[in-house]
């Protein structure tokens, strides 16, 4: 019985410690954080004695504050936050470039410039479009979270592989293109 109480107590202490770590906000800046590009194109981080061979760079408010409140996280399954960069001016120019490169990869969002076809079949919509990065075909699941309304005229489309596409202003589409979108609006 005593052993069981000790195990429960230990687990409770460990859980409290993990909770304290999760609630603690650590701000990263040029004086306490050193970012470096790895040989494989990722980003590593040293904060004091802690070293993270690979980190993820995530915008906390990707549509409103693209260059502020950048969360730096571990890349493991539980993805713990290491710290936050409040604004790019808190780090040196070389670090800003490294962070922007990672953010560009993570938030790559081609702009749809023309809709050729949207074919609805068996619960999926098959899109054929032109983007600012060239022609593209992708699939979204119907009835899911494939279409996100960012404003009355701006939509974000997320395909089944979690790639993102944007239509900045649906009012700029032709009437024919708008009719193809009617099912989603």
Image (tube, rainbow, N blue to C red):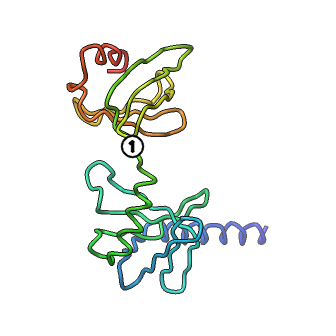
Residue name at image x 23 percent, y 30 percent: 153
Question: Is residue 103 positioned above or below 12 on the image?
Answer: above
> x, y (%) of residue 172?
21, 26
Which residue is nearer to you in this view: 20 or 137? 137
Residue 73, x across and y down, in percent: 49, 64
Q: Residue at image x 26%, y 33%?
A: 154
Q: Quadrant of the C terminus?
A: top left
Q: Looking at this view, is 55 or 79 the one in front?
A: 55
Specify the farthest residue to the front.
Answer: 134
Along the horizontal axis of the image, is 85 left or right of 160?
A: left
Residue under label 1 = 109
Placement of the N terminus among the 4 image quadrants: bottom right
Residue in view at x 32 percent, y 63 percent? 69
> Circle 1: is it few (<14), some (14-19), or many (20+) Cα within 10 Å?
some
Viewer-side residue, 139 vs 62: 139
Q: Image point 29% across, 61% down: which residue?
A: 67
Secondary structure at numbered mark 1: loop
Q: Quadrant of residue 152?
A: top left
Q: In the picture shown, does residue 115 fall above or below 39?
A: above
State the image coordinates of residue 126 (x, y, percent, origin top left): 49, 21
Q: Is residue 49 left or right of residue 24?
A: right
Location of residue 33 with respect to 126 vertically, above or below: below
């Amino acid at each position: 019985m005593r052993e069981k109480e000790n195990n429960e107590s230990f687990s409770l202490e460990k859980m409290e410690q993990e909770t304290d770590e999760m609630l603690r906000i650590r701000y990263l800046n040029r004086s306490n954080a050193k970012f470096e590009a790895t040989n494989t194109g990722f980003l590593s981080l040293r904060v004091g004695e802690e070293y993270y061979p690979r980190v993820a760079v995530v915008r906390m408010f990707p549509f409103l504050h693209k260059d502020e409140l950048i969360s730096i996280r571990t890349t493991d399954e539980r993805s713990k936050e290491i710290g936050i960069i409040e604004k790019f001016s808190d780090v040196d120019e070389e670090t800003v470039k490294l962070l922007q490169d990672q953010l560009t990869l993570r938030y790559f969002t081609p702009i749809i410039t023309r809709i050729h076809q949207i074919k609805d079949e068996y619960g999926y919509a098959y899109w054929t479009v032109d983007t600012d990065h060239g022609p593209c075909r992708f699939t979204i699941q119907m009835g899911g979270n494939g279409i996100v309304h960012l404003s009355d005229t701006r939509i974000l489309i997320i395909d089944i592989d979690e790639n993102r596409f944007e239509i900045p202003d649906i009012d700029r589409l032709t009437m024919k293109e708008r009719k193809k979108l009617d099912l989603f609006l």
